Amino acid sequence: MDELAGDRRHADSPPQLPLLPDDMLVEILHRLPPEPIHLFRASFVCKHWRGLVHDARFLRLFREFHGGTPPVLGFFSNQPRSPLFVPSSDAFAVPAAATMRKDDWLALDCHHGRALLLDRRDGKLLVWNPMNGDKRYLPLPTQAHLENEYTGAVLCAAGHAEHGDCHSCPFLVALTFGSWGDFITSACVYSPKTGVWGEITPIHTNSMVDLKPAAHVGNTLYWRLDDDSIVEFDLDKNSLDLIELPDDGFGIIMLAEDGCLGFARLDRFSLHLWSRVASIDGVVSWTHRRVIEASCATSSGSMYGSSGASWLC
């Protein structure tokens, strides 16, 4: 009887499917949607699948298959009636952000998979990787505690050209700050290797640094000032310089399509785009690239709210 029961159980069990070769399985996994939740779920199928989707070569090919640019997962917002982190879809969420009180934190920047936040309670900076939960607290420079306004940026410090997977790479933090009393804007860089802030570089300005996100071009950071100018921080030379905006009014600085510093301004239903390029004789100046007519746009003339936001890719 036991043998008959065993034979019956064996006959009722589904047949074992042959395992797919790794190269075929990788091709199938490459075709998953680009949102991280899909690879995350695939990694729980079995240990073998987890090893495949965590492989650095697989992740690089996965990004190339989907166009080379990681999807926008959401953005950090400083607007009073919005969450600290606003996901772009239900496929991605940051549970830790739900426990962070909006009144306690200020989003300063987000680059290369990390966010830079200011803890309003004790004046410390937080470098946070929302993808893996890694957190690193940094003290503010002593001089920054005495200033009226400050903002910053967090960047990958690995030195590679492509920044699609920088979660385990070293980082650096650049901070700029100023005082209403003397209108001197200063900047310095924090390196986790040394654990200290570097030399503080000052420059005289006529206004304060705006709290909107920085534009990152090459190894240079750019911040808007409250007037119609930009402060340029060259990380290689540790030097500051001032640049005039190409047009007055509201607008944002950004990385342009040609890889140079760009500027965009919304004029009623038209989006004007500039790019800062070098001429044949080496003179760098603004060039009005094009105008995009938008059928659905606001006439406010402003592309940012009063406190701005940083996109997370």
Image (cartoon, grey):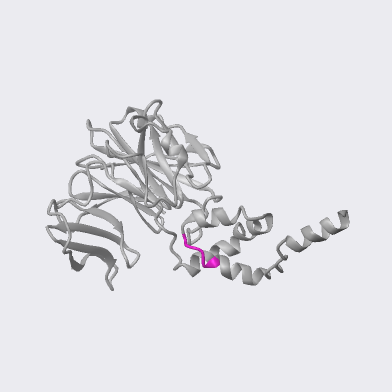
Residue 299 or 295: which is nearer the viewer? 295
Tell me if residue 176 can be seen.
Answer: no
Q: In which quadrant will I find the C terminus?
A: bottom left
Q: Is residue 26 above or below residue 307?
A: below
Q: Where residue 281 sits: x, y (%)?
A: 28, 71
User: Count of labels shown?
Assistant: 0
Magenta segment boundaries in residue numbering: 30-34
Q: In which quadrant will I find the N terminus?
A: bottom right
Q: Residue at x 18, y 45 (%)?
A: 227
Q: Is residue 286 above or below residue 121?
A: below
Q: Residue at x 32, y 63 (%)?
A: 260
Horizontal side of 298 relative to 126 (left or right) equals: left
Q: Where residue 124 sits: x, y (%)?
A: 42, 31
> Quick check: is 32 in the magenta stretch?
yes
Residue 271 or 297: which is nearer the viewer? 297
Horizontal side of 73 relative to 267 (left or right) equals: right
Q: Where residue 101 sits: x, y (%)?
A: 38, 31
> Quick check: is 231 in the magenta stretch?
no
Residue 69: quarter of image: bottom left
Magenta span main SS:
loop
Q: Residue at x 51, y 64 (%)?
A: 32
Residue 217: quarter of image: bottom left
Tell me if residue 99 can be seen.
Answer: yes
Task: Work out which residue is located at the far bottom of the displayed protein and give it.
Answer: 280
Q: Is residue 121 above or below residue 165?
A: above
Q: Residue at x 18, y 62 (%)?
A: 271
Q: Where residue 77 sits: x, y (%)?
A: 32, 42
